[in-house]
Amino acid sequence: MGLPVGFPVSLLTGIEQIERKPSQSQATLLSIFSQEYQKHIKRTHAKHHTSEAIESYYQRYLNGVRKNGAAPVLLELANEVDYAPSLMARIILERFLQKHEEAPPSKSVINSMLRDPSQIPDGVLANQVYQCIVNDCCYGPLVDCIKHAIGHEHEVLLRDLLLEKNLSFLDEDQLRARGYDKTPDFILQVPVAVEGHIIHWIESKASFGDECSHHAYLHDQFWSYWNRFGPGLVIYWYGFIQELDCNRERGILLHACFPTDIVTLCHSVA
């Protein structure tokens, strides 16, 4: 597996261990890798945003492009200091605009320029930002689009499986039209049983369920769904840590695929 220069040694060790487990799918391994990398970035985020660090990065960028504006100066700088390329591009872009614009740049302007670097009023910086965006595997507008598409793809897959099993449901859009603000992906209009547990709703997660993400989902989403709609099922399509499936008796089941043993109220296999 090719990795950027300066990639964290702790993650390299973890990846080497994962690569020795060929039973896991590539999608699962990529999901785990992405989660671990994002944890690393969050732990080190603050040190990259001190005024001293920002000014140092900006001066190094300026010196680099003076020598060779076509070289991937920003990308190499991000790899050297062990920071996500898209986030490094944001730092340098904000610093550039602060220097050249009368008013501080708004977040919406920055986001728009990152999505479309041709809007950046400096051709060299636009190219540098573009190189960072397309070479970042975990952050940035391109990655956000890919994640959104993958999430939607799995929601469509779940919808098709529910229809195939002749299960009546309301989707997220239908629920919001009825005034619900926080909803799971699908509410079953007629509850079913899975492994002896009653299920009222199903949530699709196109990711691996690790401890950090699952606990956040429990706090922000799953317990709210349980409180409003009753017990439900979460599908982590790329697998999950088995020990996290510990809330079954309280009303939240975890699965890594669509269950095959769905039982309707008339006790027939759907």
Image (cartoon, rainbow, N blue to C red):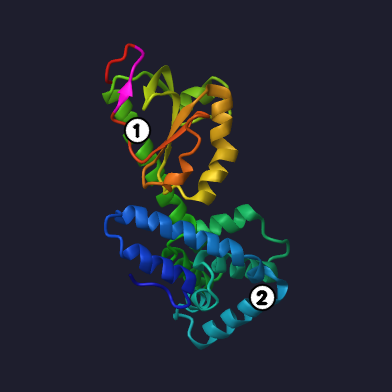
Horizontal and vertical percent position of residue 29 = 36, 57
Judged by depth in the image, the label closer to the viewer, 2 or 1, is 1
Residue at (48%, 70%) from the top-left corner? Answer: 10
Residue 263 included in the magenta stretch of the image: yes
Along the line of sight, the residue nearer the viewer: 231 or 102: 231
Task: Tell me, for residue 158, which label it has, or none.
Answer: 1
Whether residue 116 is visible to the viewer of this picture, yes or no, is: no
Q: Residue at x 46, y 60 (%)?
A: 138
Q: CA distance from mark 2 to mark 1?
A: 46 Å
In the rendered image, residue 148, in percent from the top left (x then y), is placed at 43, 46
Which one is in front, 204 or 218?
218
Give percent across and percent down for residue 60.
59, 82
Within-10-Å neighbours for mark 1: few <14, some 14–19, many 20+: many
Between 151 and 125, the one lying in front of the other is: 151
Relative to 150, residue 178 above or below? above
Which residue lies at the image location 51% right of the left edge and 45% below the top edge? 214
Q: The N terminus appears in which quarter of the rendering?
A: bottom left
Label 2 belongs to which residue? 53
Mark 2: secondary structure: helix
Q: Amino acid at mark 1?
A: Leu
Quarter containing the C terminus = top left
For the record, the magenta segment spans 261-265
